[in-house]
Image (tube, rainbow, N blue to C red):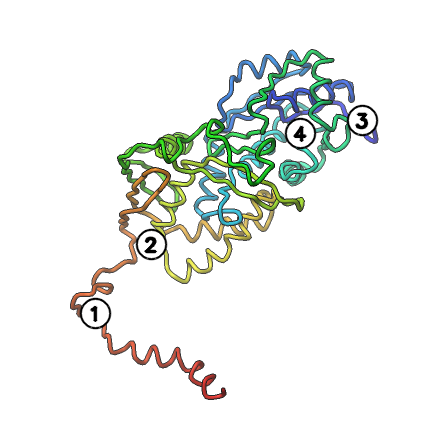
Amino acid sequence: METEINKIVLAYSGGLDTSVILKWLSEEYQCPVVAYAADVGQQEDWDAVRKKGLATGADKVVISDLREEFVRDYVFPAFRANAIYEGSYLLGTSLARPIIAKEQVRVAEAEGADAVSHGATGKGNDQVRFELTYIALNPQLAIIAPWRTWDLNSRTKLMAYAENHSIPVPVSKKNPYSSDENLLHISFEGGMLEDPWQEPEEAMFKLSLSPEAAPDKPTYIEMEFEQGTPVRIDGTSYGAADLLAKLNKLGGENGIGRLDMVENRFVGMKSRGVYETPGGTILRAAHRDLETITMDREVMKIRDSLILKYSELIYNGFWFSPEMELMQKTMDASQERVNGTVRLKLYKGNCIPVGRKSDDSLYQESFATFEEDEVYTQADAAGFIRLNALRLQIQALNR
């Protein structure tokens, strides 16, 4: 080893990969390893995670409750910007990684560690997201990525290592795919899903009913926003995490938020992922609809032109970058008038805005009406059309 490592903080979940990594790090580096787990809303027995970490060789287990901060400071800012990757993906995993890595750096500093480690493979996006955050926040920390250096390069070898070191790892043959869950979504990939022609099994889904099994009667809700941030559902105020959890329940019950796509990973390959994002799907639909009556047309054009780049920055791991800071300020500035309420109809996988109102509305019925009005002179449109058609007229004369 080129540099001496005295203490390591590992991003730990308690699953097969990080359990093996925990033991491997303690043996390979012969130093204390702190197992750090982040609660970002996944369904987990945290007491069991703590006990397993200590039993597997952790010097200490730190579990951080990041749920409120995750939704307030990462999910909601992204949804104020209408972030979406390749037209479909609402960035559930991508948004969780920077806050997990940020807290890992904080734990490393608090524990006096000089290295951080993660269980991301050398093929995926997460290695980039974790390490860009480490470097942006504390470039002095050494980074250990076992999947890029060890010889345990298969599931079979990992299982054999776990068995040899008495690491209990339950493995279900029925669900050979991997999943990642937080308050915004759950993702599934690998196993049977590696065949893009293979339809996911219904039993795989956790957060949502199938549209076919959803109620035959629609659910109506009203969501209120302040400067682009959701604050109330049906007149009741919620904290950030509780509001998203409420939307997840409403969306899941109505079969909303399933996505099956093949996406382009940052490292270059295509990957098939299946996602459930019930609350986020409702939130994005409501937010965009409110913008239709509160956002100026030209401001919207500029903001929309930035969504692609903004979303790529999140997906590729550049949350803590100068360009992201600039873009977030721009996105938030566009939201100053996005205040009001949207009424939505949730029905069998569909999320349909059916009403919107705002004290900051730019919609004026007196101008838009098809009835007689006193504020618009229709004859003015003739000159407007002639001027806009001038270049087309000249082009036609040159043919």
Q: Which residue is mark 3?
A: 4
The image quarter in which residue 163 lies:
top right
**Mark 2 is on which residue type?**
Thr
252 vs 370: above or below: above
Q: CA distance from mark 4 to mark 3?
A: 18 Å
Helix, strand, or loop for circle 2? helix
* Residue lying at the far right of the rendered structure: 2
Q: Describe residue 65's horizontal placement relative to residue 270 as left or right.
A: left
Q: Which residue is mark 1?
A: 375
Mark 4 lies on residue: 118
- Identify the residue shown where x is 47% and y is 51%: 331
Task: Pick whichever of labels 4 and 1 is earlier in the sequence.
Answer: 4
Q: How many marks?
A: 4
The Cα atoms of the two marked residues, 4 and 1, are separated by 63 Å
The dot on residue 230 is: none
Residue at figure coordinates x 48%, y 44% from the top left: 78
Q: Which residue is mark 2?
A: 294
Residue type, label 1? Val
- Who's the residue at 51% across and 17% down the image? 45
Q: Nearer the viewer, mark 3 or mark 2?
A: 2
